[in-house]
Image (cartoon, grey):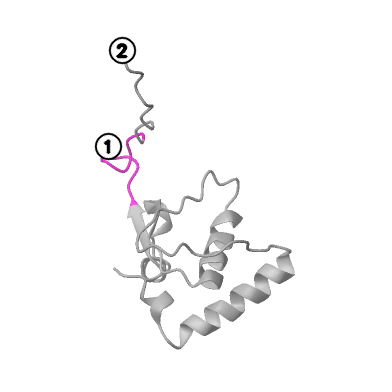
Amino acid sequence: MTPILLNNFILRPLFYLLAVVLLFLSGWKTRGRVPEIHKYVLIAAPHTSNWDFVFFLLIIFKLRLPVYWMGKRSMFKWPFQGLLKRLGGIPVDRSVKTMWSLPWPKPLKPQKSSSSP
């Protein structure tokens, strides 16, 4: 499901205003700007409390980012399932060994050349 709540022309300004006010009241500031490329990966990890998710939502509301994000399947229960999916949420069942539940591969390191000049 696409993050339709973040693309709604009526709700988008309201989410933006809510985010600006709540981030200001909580003492949070956003820095930088959205990359000028079509696709990129934004990583918000590791989180230390359940409030991190709330601040993540506020930041994407303020920056007006229609993102897809993954969360534990247990979050996606009634009455929050529809709302979270419309905010771009993808439920992940961590009890099943799938691509999403396996460890991410380590970055490749450059190989040193064995030939001498």
Q: Is residue 87 left or right of residue 58?
A: left
The image quarter containing residue 97 is top left
Query: Which is more toward the observer, 33 or 74?
Result: 33
Q: Crowding near pointer 1: few (<14 within 10 Å), some, many (20+)? A: few
Q: Residue at x 41, y 71 (%)?
A: 83
Against 55, is 113 above or below? above
x and y, in percent, of residue 75 in the image: 43, 57
Q: Residue at x 53, y 70 (%)?
A: 63
Residue at the spot of label 2:
114
Q: Residue at x 60, y 78 (%)?
A: 18
Task: Assess whether residue 99 is covered by the magenta stretch.
Answer: yes
Magenta-tinted stretch: 92-103
Against 60, is 112 above or below? above
Q: Quadrant of the N terminus?
A: bottom left
Q: Secondary structure at mark 2?
A: loop
Query: Which is more toward the observer, 67 or 38?
Result: 38
Q: Quadrant of the C terminus?
A: top left
x and y, in percent, of residue 86 in the image: 37, 71
Q: Is residue 97 left or right of residue 34?
A: left
Q: Is residue 114 left or right of residue 42?
A: left
x and y, in percent, of residue 99 in the image: 27, 41
Our reading of the magenta stretch's main secondary structure is loop
Tell whether label 1 touches label 2 (CB within 8 Å): no
Q: Crowding near pointer 2: few (<14 within 10 Å), some, many (20+)? A: few
Query: Which is more toward the observer, 45 or 49?
Result: 45
Q: Residue flagged by tag 2: what amino acid is it?
A: Ser
Task: Assess whether residue 112 is covered by the magenta stretch.
Answer: no
Q: Secondary structure at mark 1?
A: loop
Q: Residue at x 63, y 63 (%)?
A: 30
Image disc number at residue 97: 1
Q: Determine the residue located farthest toward the bottom in the rendered image.
A: 10
Against 113, is 60 above or below? below
